[in-house]
Amino acid sequence: MKHKYLPSLVLAMLLSSAVANAQINVANQINTIPANFSAYANAYLSDLTGHQGFAFLNNLNTTGDVLKKWELSFSLKIGAGLSTDYSSPDFTQNFEITGGMPTLFGTQKPGKLVFQFMDEGTGVPVVNPFTGDNLGFGLPLFPGLGTSIGISPALLPVFSLGLGYGTEVSVGVLPGAIKMATKGIANNFSISKDIMATIGIRHDAFNWVPVLHDRKFYLSLGINYSLISLGAAVGADLIGEIDAPSTDKIEVTNNLSGLNYKSSNLGLEAVLTKKFGFLDLSLFSSWNQSNYKLLSDGGIDIKIAKSFYTTVGEGSDTYSVANLIDLNQKNSHFIYGLALQFNLGRFNLALKAAPLSGHYYSLGLGYKILKEKKA
């Protein structure tokens, strides 16, 4: 009877010995989780955010001919920046990707971002001798859309007003669009805050050069600011279950409840136009800088038995990672291209494209509500 428990005792001693000999700073290693998961989130979002800002910027103006004083127009333009290069993040040694590395538009089948405790002395993962598994846990990744090209759409109703002296101001607001687009994407997924807005001002420099202006040449120089703000409450079906290791020494609880996203974009644009009857033919160049943030509400709790990382110890310690995703990035783009605007009375039809730089395209329809009063 005395030998009955000997195998279990030997296995327990092996596990305790393996952990005791490993060098593990549990707190420091757990603190790498937000930076690594944020790096993944950045790779996931970069396809969208990398072109979103200048998509809004380039939706505003399709001709350098600004409105006359107190002229008022309404336009609806839909455009998109296209991307084909997907970025892959660099993770620290505590992390690895299993399965496909999805991006928002890339691989449809989601993988897992696996956190594993490392022996800091040897630089290799700590292994459960009972199963051979690395001791850690997996964070589920969002699926991609499975497309070969990334599309950053921008749709805004825009009101523009002429202020005189070759100056025009434009304002656009569209609340609720993202909520409509994502309706039914998953259960327990609700958007609490959703707004897209833009404001811009531009001036026709040739307004002060009569020899060019009278020959229907226009050069508008503009500055634009746009904002996208989104708040979402998410449920377990969207986030997925966090894989727990095959040991009772580590327990992980998912407390992630929501995401907050904000993108602010500052853009500069020059549009050179020559008018031919009802056709405005324009060359344009644009620069845009986007600053975007993604912050998670809630996080994860990791309960670890003290015997896992100390030679002796009873009970457990709980480590809370409050900001599982804490992303703050910026990028900038410069593009140039061609724009056509067909003026048909009060209506206009506009096309804009940058096929050689940035791959931006748009189609728009405008209506002049108030025209200049003739003396």
Image (spheres, rainbow, N blue to C red):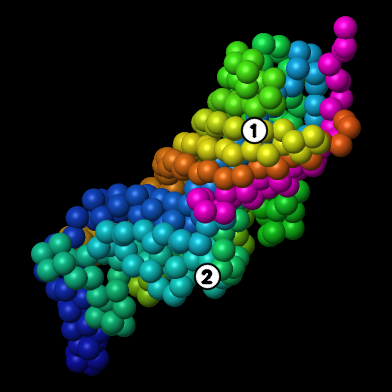
Amino acid marked by disc 2 = Thr
- Report x, y in % for residue 132: 28, 82
- The residue under the point 85% across, 20% down is 371
Please name whichever residue, 213 or 289, is drawn nearer the observer in this view of the structure. Answer: 213
- Report x, y in % for residue 278: 81, 36
Q: Judge from the rendering whether residue 86 lies leftward or rightward of residue 282; answer left or right.
A: left
**With respect to residue 367, does 231 lie above or below?**
below
Residue 354 belongs to magenta span: yes
Q: Identify the residue under disc 1.
A: 273
- Residue 309 appears in view: yes
- Residue 78 appears in view: no
Q: Identify the residue under disc 2.
A: 107
Please name whichever residue, 159 or 90, is drawn nearer the observer in this view of the structure. Answer: 159
Span highlighted in magenta in the image: 347-375
- Report x, y in % for residue 243: 45, 68
Amino acid marked by disc 1 = Thr
Please name whichever residue, 63 or 38, is drawn nearer the observer in this view of the structure. Answer: 63
Residue placed farthest to the top in the image?
Answer: 375
Q: Image quarter for residue 309?
A: bottom left
Residue 255 belongs to magenta span: no
Magenta-highlighted stretch: main secondary structure?
strand
